[in-house]
Image (cartoon, rainbow, N blue to C red):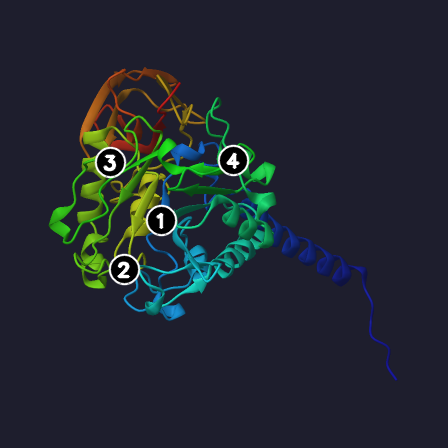
Amino acid sequence: MKLKETSSRPLLQRNLYGFLFILLFILPLSEAFAQCNGSTALCDRRYNEVAYLTTHNAFNCSAAGFQYPNQNHTLTDQLHHGVRALMLDVHDLLGVPTVYHGTFVLGSQPFASNLNEIKAFLDSNSNEVVTIILECYVSANAIETSVTNAGLMPYVFAKDTNTPWPTLQDMISSGKRLVVFTDVDDASPAQDWYHYVWNFAVETNYTVSDTAGFTSDFNRGDSLNELFILNHFVTNALLGYGSATDAAIANSNPFFMTRVNTCMAEKNKFPNFVTVDFYELGDAMTVVNTLNGMDWYGMPPKGATTKDIIVYPNPATDHITIGPGNNEAYSGGSVKIFNLAGQEVMRSEITQLPFTLSLPDEMKSGMYLIELCNNQQIPLFYSRILKRFDK
């Protein structure tokens, strides 16, 4: 029998290849686990500075056997597809908290099953913040019992009325990643996690029967409340069920983004809960990502780059600084700021970087695009900033 030749070099190579494999495997994971709701850019945003794809009557889905649905997919699939806020109607059915729309005859599920799906998602996705908005026909105590039995109490977040909303990273670090709202104000002082939604949010009308009926008018809630529910779904005027045909139109761009921009301009409100039927139809996720600065709505010009330029602070209050990074070749030009409708809201000529730009008081809170040009007005850099609602 001939023995195999041995050498330290192949072993060294194998160890090196193994190390590189582990390194390449770990680095993407470390980046993924640094994310907050899908993006590192959202980690330093406060809860009220983030947009969340929200499903109207989230439970009322064809996949679970409901008739006249508002959604096609289960809650589990919705969450895995990027939905981060769920509207649920909870009724009492023979003493059991149960979700159904209008009547249980058209389909129902125990509320506990919905909570179990949410618990499983939070358990396996440690960097995600989820919101539940309840239309409630049972008591706060019944909801608390259901939440406790589902094992969700360690996740629930309680808002201190005297302090600002925390950042997503703060919520993730503390483990308090589930925010619960209800439309019934019956919580006891000990149930501080069970938030009466109209103390915190204002909404647009939810009784729109065709796509021509969308407005920016406020419905329930105080206009001074920090959170904004942008209801963007069409329901049957008689029975209230969803229309997939209308959803495909309502959720498509530029129709959807135009309405978002119009409401932001008219109401000076950043849409937090972008609420839709049949979320997978059209461009609902693109709209939410655009609001969060995670995708471009329209491509930047060819040659534009983000290399070696930084903008800070972001979110901003009354000023921003554009820093050169490692780029020392910039010899002046201009900086322009646009709203999400593409309208220029301000510009300034600059000669060198870094450059600090004051944001005027009349500049409304919300998301903006920054364009840095050279002396020939050729765009060199694009970025997004969020102007805070409070300082």
Residue 218 or 1: which is nearer the viewer? 218
| Residue placed furthest toward the left | 212
SS at circle 3: loop
Disc assigned to residue 168:
none
Query: Mark 2 or 3 closer to N-term?
Result: 2
Query: Mark 4 or 3 closer to N-term?
Result: 4
Q: Which amino acid is tagged 4?
A: Ser
154 lies above or below 335: below
SS at circle 2: loop
Q: Which residue is mark 3?
A: 340
Disc assigned to residue 281:
2
61 lies above or below 303: below
305 lies above or below 250: above
Q: Which residue is mark 1?
A: 54
Q: Which residue is mark 4?
A: 188
Give the foreground label among 4 and 3: 4
